[in-house]
Amino acid sequence: MLARHSLLNFAMKITLIAAISADGKIAEKADQSSLDWTSKEDTQFFIETTKQAGTVVMGRKTFATINKPLKGRRLIILTSNPSQDAPMPGVEFTSEGPAELVRRLADEGVAQLALAGGSSVYGQFLKAGLVTDVYLTIEPILFGAGVPLAQGFGRIPLKLESIKQLNEQSILLHYQIKI
Ligand SMILES: NC(=O)c1ccc[n+]([C@@H]2O[C@H](COP(=O)([O-])OP(=O)(O)OC[C@H]3O[C@@H](n4cnc5c(N)ncnc54)[C@H](OP(=O)(O)O)[C@@H]3O)[C@@H](O)[C@H]2O)c1
């Protein structure tokens, strides 16, 4: 499904991809790498889906947990201070907000965008109405505390498109945002 924002003249598939604990957290602590607790099947799904999208957006704090380019994908990092980061091949730093960034990418001919977190990036794109698809891998763990998937927006109804069992323990849900 393609998003058609009422204020902007673009059409783009914008996919939120996240692994969550069974209590809905994307991390136990803000500086934690997701690879600490997610399955190899989820990592494989992330690689395939982001390669298919071609362009990936990530917040600066999430980037700090990996601190390297994503092979075969254009990686755009949101930060309020793009000039402080050392240049890295395949990685772009920008202080654009979601609508401004999506409009520029649409002008460049980008048709698909993958949102790779973290919580603040998911929340801003959801609030701006700039997400078309949501992929959630539920991993078999409870954190009891931690970083929520996203917040800062009102109710957003979803349409369940598919459920896939990635391995004996992990489930992948695909939702579309109901417009
Ligand atoms: N389980 C998963 O699937 C998954 C996926 C991704 C991340 N995570 C986890 O999520 C946590 C990080 O999430 P988070 O919400 O704390 O941080 P985040 O979204 O990764 O990064 C936040 C930072 O991004 C920059 N930023 C965000 N929006 C911006 C905007 N509109 N304009 C300019 N800069 C902007 C700011 O950087 P500056 O401070 O440089 O201005 C901000 O401090 C980590 O623990 C990570 O492991 C989990």
Image (cartoon, helix red, strand yellow):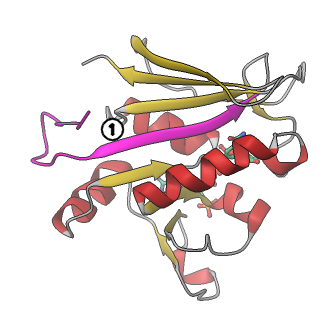
Q: Residue at x 79, y 17 (%)?
A: 22
- Relative height, residue 171 to residue 89 (above, below): above
Q: Amino acid at mark 1?
A: Leu
Is residue 71 left or right of 108 when viewed as pictured? right
Q: Residue at x 53, y 81 (%)?
A: 90
Could one spot residue 32 in this view of the protein?
no
Residue nearer the viewer, 13 or 156: 13
- Residue 136, quarter of the rendered image: top right
Q: Position of residue 92 (x, y in %)?
A: 49, 76
Q: Residue at x 78, y 60 (%)?
A: 65
Q: How many marks?
A: 1
Could one spot residue 23 in this view of the protein?
yes
- Residue 88, quarter of the rendered image: bottom right
Residue nearer the viewer, 107 or 111: 111
- Looking at the magenta stretch, what is its main secondary structure? loop
Is residue 38 left or right of 68 when viewed as pictured? right
- Relative height, residue 114 to residue 94 (above, below): above
- State the extent of the magenta-drawn residues as a range: 1-20
- Relative height, residue 160 to residue 177 (above, below): above
Q: Label 1: few (<14), some or many (≥20) within 10 Å?
A: many
| Quadrant where the image shows the N terminus | top left
Q: Which residue is mark 1?
A: 130
Q: Is residue 16 magenta?
A: yes
Q: Position of residue 147 (x, y in %)?
A: 75, 33
Q: Residue at x 70, y 57 (%)?
A: 61
| Quadrant where the image shows the C terminus | top left
